Image (spheres, rainbow, N blue to C red):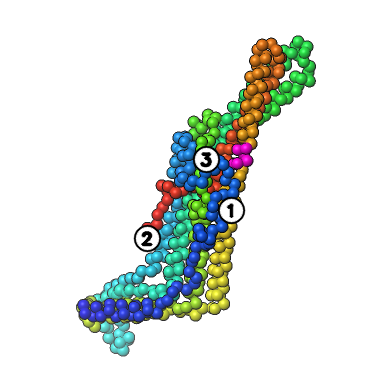
């Protein structure tokens, strides 16, 4: 036992001596990009396009609950549990976590053991004994070795940094998929309901035009309308009818998208949504927050930042290849005849550092460093571009939404005026003070105003979802988030 203690003490002393030679890891240390710093962020503050319909409050994690629509809530929950894109992203994250665990495992000592036994003898000639057969004996051999690579230059630390940054990028990619899935469900749901609303308005216009044709037929029979009037009325009817199939196709396509987003076959679309005629509409102001919160929330920005961190760490990994690698080894073995198993003369041991240095091709090694540095510059430019794209998407979505609100208000006012004209014209017709055709024309104008207002409501619903998706919320409270175990 005393000999074993001496071996362990010697190994510890050698390890401490070599570790004392270590210094800071090679390669640059990673610093978060300036846009993520509140003090340096040029995007801090409210958005330029956030008008009176946007609030400065923070976007809630489950933004779709702001619509207070149980059907929508159920569809999003189902999609976040069964969506196939999410399953792929989860599996990718788990793979990257396993790769990171493999890299971290290289920082631990390696233990190897071997052993065997046999029976026989060597040849007599090898013992310089002619015409003599040595006796057969049982033999054995066994040994154990312990090795540990000293990370003197920090190559392993940089490798671990890169692997953990890759895992962070995979987590951000999963969060980004969650954002897209939740937004996709809300968009498809809004489009299905909006198509139902527009289809209802279009069918009302068709019914009014059919009534106008019946009136024209009676007038023609009475000699008060000609063939041109009938042909014009029939052509208008066919134009109105032609608007119905695209709306039905749009609604059906939205239903199919809803089904596949929730992990179901297209034919298994939610039947309740097929009869929906009222698109979701937010009752209050849009909680858009401000620019700095956006940069910290959007998963694609976090993914780009983690990719930049991984690329920076790989510069150090490439730089360390210019220098030797040092491993500390301890081995002990026993070999001999079975009859002398465990005797002192059968034992052997070895302790000491092993320097492994493949003299590098300096040009090739420095070329790999240059490649890593260029990859870091690419990642930095990609990060900056992602930040600018995020800011542009939010500003654009808010501006489009604000302009559609103005248009919707004007269409609503026009519809109200058309309703006043329709009521007054109907009253005049009931009192015999105007012709039936005039009253019918007023009703058709009102129906056209309803159709235009329904189209604007559909655009508003889609614009709201576009704003929420640009803000990048919806991943924060996800059950599918996989946490790495260290």
- Whether tag 3 and tag 1 are in contact, CB under 8 A, the answer is no
- Whether tag 2 and tag 1 are in contact, CB under 8 A, the answer is no
Q: In which quarter of the image is the C terminus?
A: bottom left
Q: In which quarter of the image is the N terminus?
A: bottom left
Q: Position of residue 365 (x, y in %)?
A: 53, 75
Q: Nearer the viewer, mark 2 or mark 1?
A: 1
Q: Is mark 1 on a helix, strand or loop?
A: helix
- Along the horizontal axis of the image, is 134 left or right of 228? left
For residue 422, which quarter of the picture?
Answer: top right
The stretch of residues the image draws in magenta is 401-406
Q: Name the residue rendered at 48%, 57% in the picture.
A: 169
Q: How far apart are marks 3 and 2 (CA)?
A: 43 Å
Q: Residue 486 carries which label?
A: 2
Q: Earlier in the sequence, mark 3 or mark 1?
A: 3
- 189 relative to 385, above or below: above
> Mark 1 — residue?
389
> Mark 3 — residue?
285
Q: Name the residue rendered at 43%, 70% in the picture.
A: 156
For residue 375, which quarter of the picture?
Answer: bottom right
Q: Main secondary structure of the magenta part?
A: helix
Q: Where is residue 241 in the image (x, y as percent from the top left)?
A: 66, 27
Q: Where is residue 9 in the image (x, y as percent from the top left)?
A: 27, 79
Q: Name the residue rendered at 29%, 80% in the picture.
A: 10
Q: Is mark 2 on a helix, strand or loop?
A: loop
For residue 379, which quarter of the picture?
Answer: bottom right
Q: Quick one: 348 or 220, which is closer to the camera?
A: 220
Q: Which of marks 3 and 1 is in front?
A: 3
Q: How far apart are marks 3 and 1 (CA)?
A: 24 Å
């Amino acid at each position: 036992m005393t000999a074993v203690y001496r071996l362990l003490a010697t190994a510890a002393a050698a390890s401490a001596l070599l570790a004392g030679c270590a210094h800071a890891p090679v390669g640059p240390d990673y610093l978060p990009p300036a846009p993520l710093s509140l003090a340096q962020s040029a995007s801090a503050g409210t958005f330029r396009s956030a008008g009176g319909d946007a609030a400065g409050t923070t976007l809630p994690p489950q933004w779709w609950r702001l619509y207070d629509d149980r059907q929508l809530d159920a569809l999003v929950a189902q999609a976040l549990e069964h969506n196939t894109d999410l399953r792929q992203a989860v599996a990718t994250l788990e793979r990257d976590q396993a790769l990171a665990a493999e890299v971290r495992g290289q920082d631990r000592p390696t233990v190897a053991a071997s052993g065997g036994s046999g029976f026989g003898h060597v040849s007599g000639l090898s013992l310089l004994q002619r015409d003599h057969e040595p006796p057969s004996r049982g033999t054995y051999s066994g040994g154990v070795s312990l090795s540990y690579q000293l990370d003197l230059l920090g190559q392993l630390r940089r490798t671990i940094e890169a692997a953990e940054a890759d895992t962070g990028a995979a987590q951000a990619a999963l969060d980004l998929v969650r954002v897209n899935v939740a937004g996709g469900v809300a968009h498809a749901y809004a489009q299905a309901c909006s198509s139902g609303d527009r289809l209802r308005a279009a069918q009302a216009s068709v019914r009014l035009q059919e009534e106008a044709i019946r009136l024209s037929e009676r007038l023609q029979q009475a000699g008060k309308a000609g063939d041109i009037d009938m042909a014009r009325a029939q052509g208008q009817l066919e134009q109105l009818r032609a608007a119905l199939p695209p709306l039905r196709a749009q609604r059906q396509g939205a239903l199919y998208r809803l089904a596949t987003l929730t992990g179901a076959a297209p034919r298994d679309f939610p039947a309740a949504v097929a009869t929906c005629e009222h698109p979701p509409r937010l009752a209050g102001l849009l909680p858009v927050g401000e620019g700095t919160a956006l940069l910290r929330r959007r998963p694609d920005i976090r993914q780009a930042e983690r990719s930049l961190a991984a690329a920076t760490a790989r510069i150090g990994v490439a730089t360390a290849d210019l220098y030797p690698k040092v491993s500390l080894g301890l081995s002990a073995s026993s070999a001999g005849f079975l009859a002398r198993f465990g005797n002192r003369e059968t034992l052997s041991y070895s302790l000491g550092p092993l320097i492994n240095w493949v003299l590098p091709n300096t040009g090739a090694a420095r070329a790999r460093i240059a490649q890593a540095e260029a990859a870091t510059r690419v990642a930095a430019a990609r990060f900056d571009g992602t930040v600018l794209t995020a800011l542009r998407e939010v500003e654009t979505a808010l501006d489009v939404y604000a302009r559609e609100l103005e248009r919707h208000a004007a269409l609503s006012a026009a519809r109200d005026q058309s309703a006043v004209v329709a009521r007054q014209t109907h009253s005049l017709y009931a009192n015999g003070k105007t012709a039936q055709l005039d009253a019918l024309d007023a009703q058709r104008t009102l129906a056209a105003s309803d159709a235009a207002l329904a189209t604007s409501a559909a655009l508003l619903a889609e614009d709201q979802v576009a704003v929420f998706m640009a803000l990048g919320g919806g991943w924060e409270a996800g059950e599918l988030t996989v946490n790495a175990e260290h």
